[in-house]
Amino acid sequence: MPSRTASTPRVAVLADSDTRWKWGALTAYRIQSDIQLDGFLLRGRATPTVRQLDEVGARADSLREIRGMDFVRKIDRAADGSGYDVVVLACVGGAVQAMLHGLARAWQGAAQRPVVVTGYVGVVYEKLADGLLLRHGADVVLANSRHDADRFRAVYRGVGADDSSVVECALPFLGGDRYTGEHDPYTVVFAAQPSVPDSRADRTYLLRRAVEHARKHPEREVLIKLRSKPGEHTTHIEELPYQKLAAKAPGGLPANCRLVYGNMGEVLDRTDLLVTVSSTAALESLHRGIPTAVLTDLGVREVLGNHHFLGSGCLASWDELDAGHRPEPDPDWLARQGVASDVPYEKAFDAARDRVTALREADRLPPLAAYYTPRTAPGYLPGILARHGLDPQGEPLAGHAEAPEETGGLRRIARETVREAARGAYRHGVQRVAPAIRRWGQL
């Protein structure tokens, strides 16, 4: 397995979407800046496009698409010099669980193995127990705040699982310049989300209110920050892109209101008021000291995720914002969320850095031991593993191991057009055909 004397640690990051790649790569650099980082993009519906990767901006020494089974094979190869010191699993919970079982099987009996790290890309407002138990078994489960660390440990203790893997840190993409005062023009940014809210009526309402705010304040600039272009996927499926809703907006968008893309950090550089339903962008904004509003127009509900901001002082409606209200965040709430803290931002990663270093330098690490096993979850685990080509013991299912492995980085740009065409057809089915079938089924 990996060399314990290597001068430059080798880190592999497996991610299944643009935002998870950003989290995984930046987390690796926060834990230790001087590394060789190889990126692997798990092939699936949300595999990021070249444009999305450019927008995220997280760098790697190499980057390629890969199947989960081939990732397990790659990480298990030590004899050819490709052994890793750390593996960061930046994927949805089911994929993390499958990789944990696959790697545990591959490393069975090994004297040394990489340290396995996982966590969440942002605010954890749904599927807390489900997502956490699917991540159990990693050496380190990162919690982005003191609030999350307390909740994570409570879940693990509640099922009788070891909670020592939970380590408090912070979101790795916070930072940027502190807000020092209003820009010219005063800029309001509505940070849209792919799946929250999910109905046409609610999304149309939010777009209309942003447009109305621009019309009521012609001296302001209103930017509608979008995560992806039509046909692209992010961590969540977007069935009703705001671009298409904006194209049908009565009277169109006013001159001081427009759709924008790009890196969120760069957009925040010119923001005077960040408005969202529950986007992680709110935490980025709050960390910089930018006035931030979490909308209550559609209610404060778990399905929207804005219940996470209870006690923050940031809850507000478009009516209040139209009238000039600027929310004032609660300092204690901010501290518990790991943003705008009195502790220097880089210090937030000390515990994670120390834990990973100690594990790397250990003479021998114990086998990976997930809470879910064929004994504890016989009706749940096999299905999760099968979706990634593994049997309940973490071995490749018949027919999967024999499939040829894709070669080349990111399936190479020369094949990008073909890939995008196929993905576009698939997404048309997801975004148009599937919702129609669901509606027909309700008749």
Image (spheres, grey):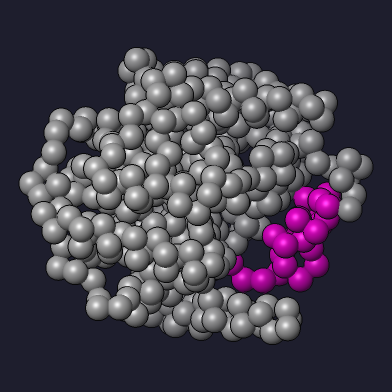
Seen from this angle, which residue lies furthest left?
184
Q: Quadrant of residue 335?
A: top left
**Residue 102 drawn in magenta:** no
Residue 409 in the image: state x and y as whole percent.
Answer: 42, 62
Front one among 120 and 29: 120
User: Is there any visible trace of residue 204 in the rendered image?
Assistant: yes
User: Is there any visible trace of residue 232 in the rendered image?
Assistant: no
Q: Relative to residue 183, is residue 47 depicted above or below? A: below
Identify the residue at horizontal 72%, vertical 30% (top origin).
155
Q: Relative to residue 411, is residue 264 depicted above or below? A: above
How many numbered marks, from 0 up?
0
Tell me if 415 is positioned left or right of 66 in this view.
left
Residue 54 in the image: state x and y as whole percent.
Answer: 30, 58
**Residue 405 drawn in magenta:** yes
Identify the residue at horizontal 53%, vertical 76% (top origin).
431
Tell me if 128 is positioned left or right of 167 in this view.
right
Q: Which residues are magenta?
A: 380-408
Q: Which quadrant: the N terminus?
A: top right
Give the main secondary structure of the magenta stretch.
Answer: loop
Identify the residue at horizontal 54%, vertical 81% (top origin).
432
Front one among 338 and 360: 338
Front one among 243 and 129: 243
Identify the residue at horizontal 71%, vertical 39% (top origin).
129
Q: Relative to residue 430, is residue 271 depicted above or below? A: above
Q: Which quadrant: the C terminus?
A: bottom right
